[in-house]
């Protein structure tokens, strides 16, 4: 016996005894919570709508495989498009989505909770329920998510304290009174909304995560307990859950459900061919820690985030985690007994504005199944195949580990799982070294009859870096599958016959064996040729075939039963859809509760929904081009509509399907040429002028700070932006000192600037450019020489413009000073040291002032929220907003650029109109020239900051702009800030800029509102 199964076997034996006395008959029983029903809530305070045993979860008493995808609504700031993502998740076969909620956006300042617009959770919950998706709510408070300070608001980052028992984050994420008080408003508000949307109230929420990837520790365990208890007090009755960042036994007993997160190939998108060895201890770890609950991965690698300076970009991330990765690693999860998984990410989206943390750029595409543009990737097709398999064959939801064979075929590992109730088995084969690129031919003894397969010739083929599953002893309808070396897709009824859909790689040999009492009559329609053999003694009918491109139907007829085998090559299979048909009751659209999936379709780019009423079928979805719609469904069909319009035909084929032509409507996306439109230009750095009136700037006059990082030198003022209510975006500092003939002239201006990894800064003395700091460090010291001609009698001003690259994440290495703190959310952004070299202490700076985002924490833009803007003069004045009058500005393009470095930060605006065809989803992006330069540019579209282009670091050049931010039927404003940090010609201009459509899809979702408040509202 596998040594790790001992504990679980003992536990199962106990369950068997309990079954004998009637205590385990209720699937809501778990060993952690003996649930005696008391209405809808048991005596532990948990709903009986959600239950579990050691194998899997139950919803309304039905065993499920929880197949979820991560989606952050705040990374898609157009609420009308959220239903596009939920519909695509449902079409991919998922039955749940998981959502992080961003504390920093909802609680921008102490005492203020904003749950409007893009912060409103209700449209998401409604969209999920409409699609038939459960929701795992993950409100943090800390979420990580490669977002600014892990979602912790700026006003919370500044709370005091530096206890030795919590060295990473001061008093943050602890039970300290200051932090306890800080999360109350947010938690009370967000948990109240989540509670109202629980399954017990007819909503989609089935689980709530407490905190995120946290560790055991003094004050930390107590803090998690406080969060959970407050959630219960606010009405949470669904299970609570924690996600351990790995196999660390953190917070195992803190909540109802314990799970682990895993990213087995890490995040090196610059080297996408490198895979680390696949973990082999997941099962043993689970069975030694929590064998009494389902094995759950709250986060499993669905892609990868990418960092500044990457040479791979998100194309590299998608290559790193492409479909063969999904097969190897997801099948390995199943082999380890996992029956609940959330793929991080399903849709990544955009870290617009100041959402990114310090080492991530604007795009959060993540190499996910659905791209940032909301288009489907090849990974979507693989995820759909896997999800439909899990949905169609419930035997895998309850399996026991029967053994692992690492010796029969050299270099190959085969895990045997068996359902203890049905006897069905699954044999999961992969290379022992998951990165092995060799192709291996093999035969395996499988199933209750221990048959060596394939039987009729050829071998099973394991491709390099791949995995496959042989399924045996499965029932579909009233028929019996003895084994299949082809991957199973789904099962359905075709004209009353049991149909089994399978697929494989074109050109490879596969075999399917069915139980048949008599020699069947076989009719094959399609390109794949089959070889058959029937054994009367054991009633085995074997079909051997080499997969050809396309779909082949094998009708298997007999006097007592009829079966249909559908054989597809892989590419054809990825184009299949199995939309759900609504059932009855409160959860009519949930496949695990009420809905059914009796149809198999192909042809369209996307099938969003289906409604079946006797002989009529109504479909909605998207078309990328003209196509043939194929429907395997009821033979009595005589009417099909597509997006509300009747389809001509349909015609019945010899394969038993309905076919109809979907021609769609041709459409062109006529887009303006950004190279030829009129651009306007203005200087966005007037602060360096001696005559600049700085009365509107904030006095930086604090002499103490709660921050755990002390200033390096200088004083007496603390120049940390968070202390003044500025938590993101560009920062501008203006220091003043006196000079006259009685004072020694400074020989240099020494500044230590902290802006986060990859930040930059520029400095001026009066209107003389001192130079730039562009080192890619988190903090950098510069000593800029001063000459006599730079000085004035009287007041002199040093101006420093710096990037704020976003806050750190918990545990992130941010500095490497000997003996210094290395990890902290609270590392400051601003100036940590300032000094006039050559000057005595009594003749240093006399004051400092600061500019950050307009209004700081009291920002006026309640649509775009606190993290949209920074402290550039153009942003403070509202030049990026629609409606600003730039008619008096100089006509100049960003392609002409600036005249020389250090003179200014340039700001360019253009206005154009769009009139794109209605009834289409047309993903658009603004694309910068890829040629490098030492400049930093920010992209604004109708007031939204949608991109930060760092041309000497990269890699991002293309920035997605969704409908709803772009007005597809009206006027639009695009603006660019251009900050040159170098002196070469390529540092002074943006060579080109294009507006590009990545596709034209008839369909999409309607109800997309444009909400772009302008200058008259926010600045006038």
Image (spheres, helix red, strand yellow):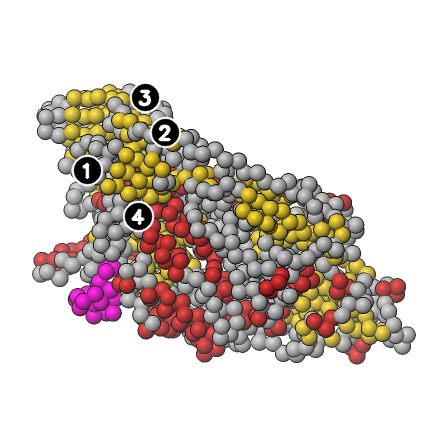
Residue 994 location (% of width, % of height): 62, 42
Q: CA distance from mark 1 to mark 4?
A: 25 Å
Identify the residue at image location x=43%, y=62%.
120
First in residue order: circle 2 vs circle 4? 4
- For residue 508, what is the image quadrant? top left
The residue beneath circle 3 is 527
Residue 831 left/right relative to 261: right
The mark found on residue 661 in the picture is: 2
Q: Are marks 2 and 4 in contact (CB under 8 Å)?
A: no
Q: Nearer the viewer, mark 2 or mark 4?
A: 2
Q: Magenta span: helix, strand or loop, mainly?
A: loop
First in residue order: circle 2 vs circle 1? 1
Q: Nearer the viewer, mark 1 or mark 4?
A: 1
Can residue 432 be seen here? The reply is no
Residue 775 location (% of width, % of height): 68, 55
Residue 187 location (% of width, % of height): 41, 70
Whether 37 is among the magenta residues is: yes
Magenta range = 31-53
Q: Nearer the viewer, mark 3 or mark 2?
A: 2
The mark found on residue 336 in the picture is: 4
Identify the residue at image location x=22%, y=51%.
584
First in residue order: circle 1 vs circle 4? 4
Q: Nearer the viewer, residue 90 or 275?
A: 90
């Amino acid at each position: 016996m596998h040594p790790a199964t001992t504990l679980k076997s003992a536990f199962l034996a106990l369950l068997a005894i309990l079954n004998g006395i009637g205590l385990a008959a209720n699937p809501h029983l778990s060993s952690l919570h003996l649930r005696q029903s008391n209405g809808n809530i048991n005596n532990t305070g948990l709903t009986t709508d959600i239950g579990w045993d050691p194998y899997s979860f139950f919803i309304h008493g039905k065993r499920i495989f929880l197949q979820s995808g991560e989606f952050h609504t705040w990374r898609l700031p157009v609420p009308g498009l959220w239903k596009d993502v939920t519909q695509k998740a449902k079409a991919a076969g998922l039955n749940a989505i998981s959502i992080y909620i961003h504390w920093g956006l909802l609680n921008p300042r102490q005492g203020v909770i904003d749950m409007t617009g893009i912060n409103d959770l209700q449209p998401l919950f409604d969209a999920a329920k409409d699609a038939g998706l459960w929701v795992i709510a993950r409100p943090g408070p800390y979420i990580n998510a490669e977002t600014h300070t892990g979602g912790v608001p700026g006003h919370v980052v500044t709370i005091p304290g530096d206890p030795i028992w919590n060295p990473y984050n001061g008093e943050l994420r602890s039970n300290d009174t200051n932090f306890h008080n800080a999360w109350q408003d947010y938690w009370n508000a967000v948990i109240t909304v989540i509670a109202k949307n629980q399954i017990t109230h007819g909503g989609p929420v089935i689980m709530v995560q407490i905190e995120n990837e946290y560790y055991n520790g003094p004050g930390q365990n107590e803090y998690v307990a406080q969060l959970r208890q407050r959630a219960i007090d606010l009405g949470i009755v669904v299970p609570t859950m924690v996600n351990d960042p790995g196999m660390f036994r953190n917070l195992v007993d803190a909540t109802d459900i314990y799970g682990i997160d895993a990213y087995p190939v890490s995040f090196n998108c610059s080297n996408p061919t490198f895979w680390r060895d696949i973990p082999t201890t997941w099962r043993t770890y689970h069975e030694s820690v929590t064998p009494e609950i389902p094995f759950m991965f709250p986060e499993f690698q669905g892609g990868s985030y990418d960092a500044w300076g990457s040479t791979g970009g998100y194309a590299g991330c998608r290559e790193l985690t492409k479909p063969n990765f999904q097969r190897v690693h997801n099948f390995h999860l199943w082999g380890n007994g996992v029956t609940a998984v959330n793929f991080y990410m399903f849709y990544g989206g955009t870290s617009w504005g100041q959402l990114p943390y310090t080492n991530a750029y604007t795009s959060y595409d993540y190499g996910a199944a659905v791209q940032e543009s909301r288009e489907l990737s090849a990974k979507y097709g693989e995820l759909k195949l896997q999800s439909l398999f899990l949905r169609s064959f419930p035997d895998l939801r309850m399996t026991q580990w029967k053994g692992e064979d690492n010796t029969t075929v050299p270099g190959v590992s085969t895990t045997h799982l068996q359902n203890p109730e049905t006897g069905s088995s699954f044999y999961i084969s992969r290379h022992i070294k998951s990165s092995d690129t060799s192709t291996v031919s093999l035969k395996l003894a499988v199933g209750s009859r221990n048959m060596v397969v394939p039987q009729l010739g050829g071998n099973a083929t394991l491709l390099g870096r791949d995995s496959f599953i042989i399924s045996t002893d499965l029932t579909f309808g009233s028929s019996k599958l003895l084994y299949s070396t082809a991957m199973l897709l789904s099962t359905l009824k075709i004209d009353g016959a049991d149909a089994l859909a399978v697929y494989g790689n074109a050109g490879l040999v596969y075999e399917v064996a069915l139980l048949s009492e008599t020699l069947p009559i076989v009719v094959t329609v399609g390109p794949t040729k089959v070889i058959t053999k029937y054994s009367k003694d054991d009633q085995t009918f074997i079909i051997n075939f080499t997969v050809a491109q396309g779909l082949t139907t094998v009708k298997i007829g007999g006097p007592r039963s009829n079966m249909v085998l559908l054989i597809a090559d892989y590419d054809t299979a990825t184009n299949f859809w199995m939309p759900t048909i609504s059932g009855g009751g409160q959860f009519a659209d949930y496949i695990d509760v009420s809905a059914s999936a009796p149809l198999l379709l192909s042809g369209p780019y996307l099938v969003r929904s289906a409604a079946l009423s006797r002989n009529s079928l109504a479909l909605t979805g998207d078309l990328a081009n003209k196509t043939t719609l194929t429907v395997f469904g009821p033979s009595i069909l005589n009417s099909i509509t597509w997006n509300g319009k009747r389809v001509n035909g349909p015609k019945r084929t010899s394969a038993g399907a309905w076919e109809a032509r979907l021609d769609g409507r041709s459409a062109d996306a006529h887009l303006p040429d950004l190279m030829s439109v009129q651009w306007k230009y203005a200087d966005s750095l007037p602060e360096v002028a001696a005559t600049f009136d700085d009365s509107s700037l904030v006095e930086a006059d604090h002499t103490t700070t709660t921050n755990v990082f002390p200033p390096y030198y200088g004083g007496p003022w603390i120049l940390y932006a968070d202390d003044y209510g500025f938590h993101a975006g560009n920062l501008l500092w203006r220091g003043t000192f006196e000079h006259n003939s009685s004072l020694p002239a400074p020989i240099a201006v020494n500044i230590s600037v902290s802006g986060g990894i990859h930040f930059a800064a520029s400095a001026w003395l009066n209107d003389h450019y001192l130079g730039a700091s562009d080192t890619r460090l988190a903090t950098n010291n510069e000593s800029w020489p001063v000459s006599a001609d730079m000085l004035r009698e009287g007041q002199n001003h040093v101006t420093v413009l710096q990037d704020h690259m976003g806050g750190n994440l918990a545990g992130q290495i941010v500095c490497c000073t000997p003996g210094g703190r290395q990890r902290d959310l609270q590392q400051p952004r601003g100036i940590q040291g300032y000094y006039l070299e050559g000057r005595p202490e009594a003749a240093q700076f006399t004051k400092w002032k600061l500019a950050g985002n307009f209004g700081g924490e009291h920002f006026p833009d309640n649509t775009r929220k606190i993290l949209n803007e920074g402290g550039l003069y153009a942003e403070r004045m509202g030049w990026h907003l629609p409606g600003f009058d730039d008619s008096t500005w100089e006509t100049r393009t960003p392609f002409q650029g600036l005249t020389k470095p250090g003179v200014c930060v340039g700001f360019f605006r253009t206005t154009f109109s769009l009139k794109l065809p209605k009834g289409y989803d047309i993903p658009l992006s603004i694309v910068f020239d890829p040629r490098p330069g030492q400049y930093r540019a920010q992209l604004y579209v109708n007031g939204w900051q949608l991109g930060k282009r760092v041309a000497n670091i990269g890699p991002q050049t293309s920035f997605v702009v969704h409908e709803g931010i772009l007005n597809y039927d009206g006027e639009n404003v695009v603006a660019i800030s251009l900050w040159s940090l170098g002196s070469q010609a390529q540092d002074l201009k943006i060579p080109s800029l294009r507006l590009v459509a990545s596709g034209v899809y008839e369909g999409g979702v309607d109800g997309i509102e444009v909400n772009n408040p302008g200058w008259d509202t926010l600045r006038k």
